[in-house]
Image: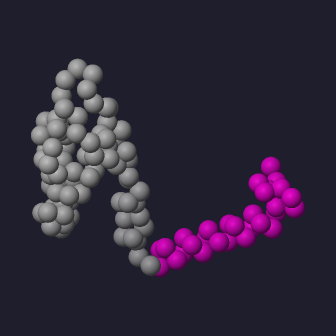
């Protein structure tokens, strides 16, 4: 099988690569780079080409679909700087208060 030949992939894998590619292109990634990343993701999730048939291939792990942390932080970024700073001051005061009550040698503090 020549490099780049997608004949060993199932229809499901091809569809998945198409959807992933569309997502990358929506985010401004070029077509060729989006296609490369999409197939890399499919390979990572399913271990490469799985020709259809009973007992052939390995189940998908969906490992790449669980990377939700990348989109985190948007809510905090949308808040004004003054609100974030006030929240940080309150958190620092709480940490200071709890540290003052802490019993030496006990990492959790008093119960």
**Where residue 93 appears, x then y in whole percent?**
67, 71
Viewer can see residue 20? no
**Where residue 4 appears, x then y in whole percent?**
15, 51
Q: Is residue 89 magenta?
A: yes
Left or right? Give the position of 47 relative to 6.
right
| Residue, far bottom | 82
Picture residue at 19% right of the left edge, 23% below the top? 53
**Where residue 66 appears, x then y in whole percent?**
38, 47
Picture residue at 24% right of the left edge, 57% below the top? 37
Viewer can see residue 84? yes
Q: Please say if 80 is above or below 41.
A: below
The quadrant where residue 23 appears: bottom left
**Where residue 44 appears, x then y in whole percent?**
32, 47
Between 73 and 81, which is closer to the camera in this rendering?
73
Between 78 and 46, which is closer to the camera in this rendering?
46
Q: Quadrant of the N terminus?
A: top left
Instruction: Tell me which segment is drawn in magenta.
Output: 82-111
Q: Please say if 31 is above or below 79.
A: above
Picture residue at 12% right of the left edge, 63% below the top? 31
| Residue, far top | 54
Left or right? Give the position of 74 relative to 32.
right
Q: Is residue 2 magenta?
A: no
């Amino acid at each position: 099988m020549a490099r780049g030949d997608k004949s060993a992939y199932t229809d499901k894998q091809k569809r998945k690569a198409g959807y992933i590619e569309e997502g990358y292109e929506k985010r401004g990634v070029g077509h060729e780079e989006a296609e490369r990343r999409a197939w890399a993701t499919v390979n990572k999730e399913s271990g490469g080409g799985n020709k259809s048939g009973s007992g052939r291939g390995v189940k998908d792990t969906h490992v790449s679909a669980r990377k939700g942390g990348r989109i985190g932080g948007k809510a905090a970024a949308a808040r004004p700087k003054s609100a974030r700073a006030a929240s940080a001051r309150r958190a620092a005061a709480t940490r200071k208060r709890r540290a003052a009550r802490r019993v030496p040698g006990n990492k959790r503090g008093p119960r």
